[in-house]
Amino acid sequence: MKKPPPITDSEWSIMKVLWKKQPLTSTQIATQTKSHPQTIKTFLSRLVKKKAIGYEKTGRSFYYRTLFSEKECQRHESRSFLNRVFGGSLRPMISHLVEDESLSQREIQELKALLNKTSRGGKE
């Protein structure tokens, strides 16, 4: 199974638009991201070169679609972040988030439920 390529913050905005509805033209993507069409074409070209998206030519228009699901890209990016920032260890990251962020009671309960589910071997 191929893994998604690294995606920059600007490229993520394009991917998010495509994950909501695809295929789309560069003009449609530019309209939804409120970006200059030439800027979008540059990012689309980069994403095609990285093989994160593909396209189909219909008449004079190019229709773009993602080659990886949002979940696949999130998983890859999360793992990359975890390795870069926390040496691949989940515990320090969770400790940092819990200690440094103000969590609502609801968020605390959701975390507890997720940890309980994980400790029982359940998967999402």
Image (cartoon, rainbow, N blue to C red):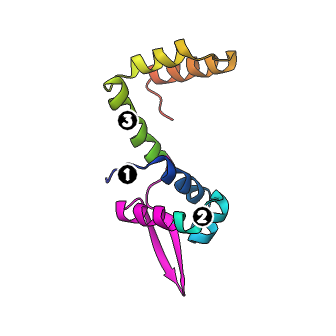
The crowding category of the residue bearing disc 1, from other C-alpha atoms within 10 Å (few below 14, some 14 to 19, many at least 20), is: some
Residue receiving disc 1: 4
Q: Secondary structure at mark 3?
A: helix
State if disc 3 and disc 2 touch (CB < 8 Å).
no
Q: Position of residue 119 (x, y in %)?
A: 45, 19
Q: Which mark is residue 79?
A: 3
Front disc: 2 or 3: 2
Q: Secondary structure at mark 2?
A: loop
Q: Which residues, given as a range, are shown in magenta?
A: 41-70
What's the residue at 68%, 17% (across, down)?
Answer: 104
C-alpha separation, residue under disc 2 versus residue under disc 1: 26 Å
Q: Position of residue 37 (x, y in %)?
A: 58, 68
Can residue 30 be seen here? The reply is yes
The crowding category of the residue bearing disc 3, from other C-alpha atoms within 10 Å (few below 14, some 14 to 19, many at least 20), is: some
Residue receiving disc 2: 36
| Badge 3 or badge 1: first in the primary sequence | 1
